[in-house]
Amino acid sequence: MNILVCISKAPDTTSKITFKDGDTKFNEDGVQFIVNPYDEWYALVRALELKEANGGKVTIISVGTADYEPIMRKALAIGADEAFRVDSEASDAYQVAAEIANYISSNSFDLVLTGKETINYNGSQVGGMIAAIIDSPYASHATKLEVNGSTAMVERDKQGGVEVLELTLPAVISAAKGMAEQRIPNMRGIMAARSKPLTVVPASVTETLTETIKFSLPPAKGDVKLVDPENMTELINLLHNEAKAI
Amino acid sequence: MNFEHYENHDMITQMVRDFSEKEIRPHVMEWDEKQHFPVELFKKMGELGMMGVFVPVQYGGAGFGYFEYYTIVSEIAKVCGSIGLSVAAHNSLCTNHILMFGTDEQRKKWLPKLATAEWIGAWGLTETGTGSDAGGMNTTAVKDGDHWVLNGSKNFITHAISGDVAVVIVRTGEKGDSHGMSAFVIEKGTPGFSGGKKENKLGMRASETAGLFFDNCRVPNKNMLGKEGDGFVQAMKVLDGGRISIAALSIGIAKGALEASIKYSKEREQFGKPISQFQAIAFKLADMATEIEAAELLTLQAADMKNRGLKMTKESAIAKYYASEVSVRCANEAVQIFGGYGFTKDFPAEKYYRDCKLCTIGEGTSEIQKLVISREILK
């Protein structure tokens, strides 16, 4: 079984978020990047589990500049066999998806996995776009994935229940929480990652479909409101009308 | 000396942080209160390769050097000093002694089990009556055919009860003769070999400390490490590396105390602003950060020399002495910054304060380090 896992980087959750170039770009200075958790904890780990059960190979692909390589080495340390980096300063989801689709068109895979979204842009677009470009079945936000011969069985959470889908392989699936459990790389994996192949391929897509006009930070959190313990009416009023929690 | 990060630094740091946050931090206070030694945790660390850091791959270890080891011990100690101490004792004392002085046959027998933490290791030098004066030990081994018969006891031994194997240094010759001691490997279950009562300690409470007892304990010849009479000299060489352990442990605790202090002082408001904005607090943080970085550089210097196989008795003693004293100062300031809350167990400062004190005592007190340093510079 030949699996491709798309790996994106994301700022560590404790990073201070600032913007540059007239608030049109995320300022990466001093930011520590990690493997996007949906890509790492669920998509990559499930791919490794499927490989362990059925044999085959897990390849990872990232679209980005050389600063992607540390996080790609981590994915290799966790257990991926081989890595490809498309050397691109991609600026939107389409550009990323089109590069990956290009790569897939000349290398065949049974399964392409992505995280359901990156934790910085929360776009949730790349998986669907890849599937559209390569004209393959697609299931998003999968919480469970089983493969049986040439079909994949996928579960997705729905409001109040679960949806079960069956897809014919090759297929693209985006992974949500529940598909697998985080794996911490061991020392041997970290050592082995140094000698696993990480190939850089030139970018081929220049087209983008979106343009960023402006980023802005969410409004600062307000002060804590203290309510007198005797005044339950006010507490209920605030929870109902202001916080809209009840 | 190379001050640049070694190749795997970031990945190992991240890996140890992920592991510590997930598997250690949620249990720190519970283990501390109950003095619980979490054996299962060490098995998990074994799977990740943290229990055989120096052990070459051929014997089932990770095959890393002292930079990686420094990162592992200090990152764990940031979260829990006790676990850091146990990782250090297992790796750099027991396992390392067998690695440094064992024959290929001895290495093959014990290292694969230790490197994966299938077995947990202990190391015994100190006795009730001999700490700094380790050479004055009273536990003896007397030759009887192809065995040695051990009698006596060892004191303050990490993993004395839960350990599956111990390296012990005992007297095989005249008292007062530094070549009158030998090192033996003893497996749990050997008749006449037992662990004693667990010590109830001020700090490092999740790390098990107890006595080891030998009552006509017969150990085969083939369990002797190196030659008869080499034990004390071997122990001193093991401790040269061990000092890097305690320096790493000290720095981890100090960094944990500093991180907690920074976080708290930014959140805690008095007189209408965060206390971090008062110089009285900000300067404490500045001193802590400065001393920690100095201690880190001294320790990396010793680690670098150790990696290159150079003699580093003085450098490791300097690193251990300075880092452990820095740890105590930082933890003390952390409690002060936390104020009344620092005196309670609901906040992390008090645990750093209790744990750090071991560092100026264990594996050679600060005073013994000064003795080592002064002897080296007065040669």
Image (tube, coloured by chain):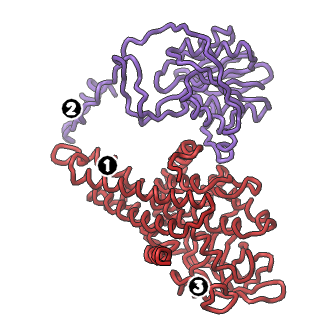
Secondary element type, mark 2: helix
Give me the residue at 34% from left, 23% from top.
A217
> Looking at the picture, how far across and down is residue B332, in whole percent?
33, 63
- The kind of residue tagged 3 is Gly
* Callout 3: SS: helix
Kind of residue indicated by mark 1: Tyr
Image coordinates of residue A85 in percent, x first then y, are 63, 24
Q: Position of residue B12 (x, y in %)?
A: 57, 46
Chain identifier matching the red colour in the rendered picture: B
Residue hosting label 3 = B135
Spot the purple chain and give its letter: A
- Depth check, front residue: B246 or A124: B246
Between marks 2 and 1, how big is the CA–CA gap? 31 Å
Secondary structure under the numbered disc 1 in the rendered image: helix
Residue located beneath label 1 in the image: B264
Chain holding disc 1:
B
Q: Is residue B48 left or right of residue B187?
A: left
User: Same chain for the residues at labels 3 and 2, yes or no?
Assistant: no
Could you say which disc has been placed on residue A234 in the image? 2
Q: Which amino acid, mark 2?
A: Glu
